[in-house]
Amino acid sequence: KQEVTQIPAALSVPEGENLVLNCSFTDSAIYNLQWFRQDPGKGLTSLLLIQSSQREQTSGRLNASLDKSSGRSTLYIAASQPGDSATYLCAASLWSGNTGKLIFGQGTTLQVKP
Amino acid sequence: DAGVTQSPTHLIKTRGQHVTLRCSPISGHKSVSWYQQVLGQGPQFIFQYYEKEERGRGNFPDRFSARQFPNYSSELNVNALLLGDSALYLCASSPRGQVNTGELFFGEGSRLTVL
């Protein structure tokens, strides 16, 4: 059974710091890994999608890496800003039979202090 | 282009009642998935539909049901509501039936409170 874990559960940093959010998964047979942002009470905004054949993806100040062999993904946020404060969720994509679904971690809640 | 739209955004029900949540996918997307997110947890998979057919179901009781219409919009129905059904219900769409190869796009969710 695939399990996705995110560490830490919460993180508070001063503005301008570079930071790393961690995601681990138990089954390396994933098809892709997706990082999302969720603001309080809101839906999910897709940040980055890494296909299983890729090792990293970049978008602006965000960089996500994927190491299937070790079952890990990291989201690197450069020069953090107060507007980055949100919950960040990683999700591993599984294919079972005729069904594709995402298995989510519990999220890391980030607070960036001005 | 409009994103995934869900309605209603908020609703309050009492135990034992029934609820219907609606979702319109991004134009051109044929696959719709439903997820339940309890406060403080990550979303959990409920259903996936593609071309009006159920492709998969998560570990949820039979009180939960869904369907997809010819225009690819979808409804999630929950009968005999329990307090534990209180959650944010998220709908997601993708262009293909196989979410494993594509990106999933989520709506803002429907916040259900069961009293």
Image (spheres, rainbow, N blue to C red):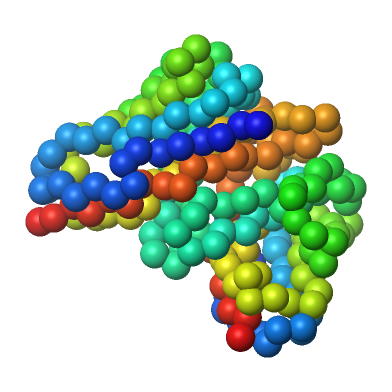
Q: Quadrant of the C terminus of chain B?
A: bottom right
Residue B62 as seen in the image, left or right of residue A17:
right
Front residue of A88/A84: it is A88
For residue B61, what is the image quadrant?
bottom right
Position of residue A59 measured from the top left corner of the image (x, y, whole percent): 36, 33
In-front residue for pair B56/B38 = B38
The quarter of the displayed image where residue A70 is located: top left
Q: Is residue B15 left or right of residue A48?
A: right
Residue at 77% of width from left, 70% of height from top? B78
Position in image of residue B92 (x %, y %): 64, 52
What x and y, as percent, mark residue B74? Answer: 78, 61
Residue A87 placement (x, y as % from top left): 37, 52
Q: Is residue A35 visible?
A: no
Residues A46 and B86: in front is B86
Q: Residue at x 84, y 42 (%)?
A: B55
| Quarter occupied by the N terminus of chain B | bottom right
Is A78 situated left or right of B54 in this image? left
Q: Residue at x 62, y 51 (%)?
A: B44
Residue lying at 72% horizontally and 53% vertically, measured from the top left: B46
Q: How many marks?
A: 0
Q: Is residue B41 above or below residue A61?
A: below
Q: Is residue A105 visible?
A: yes
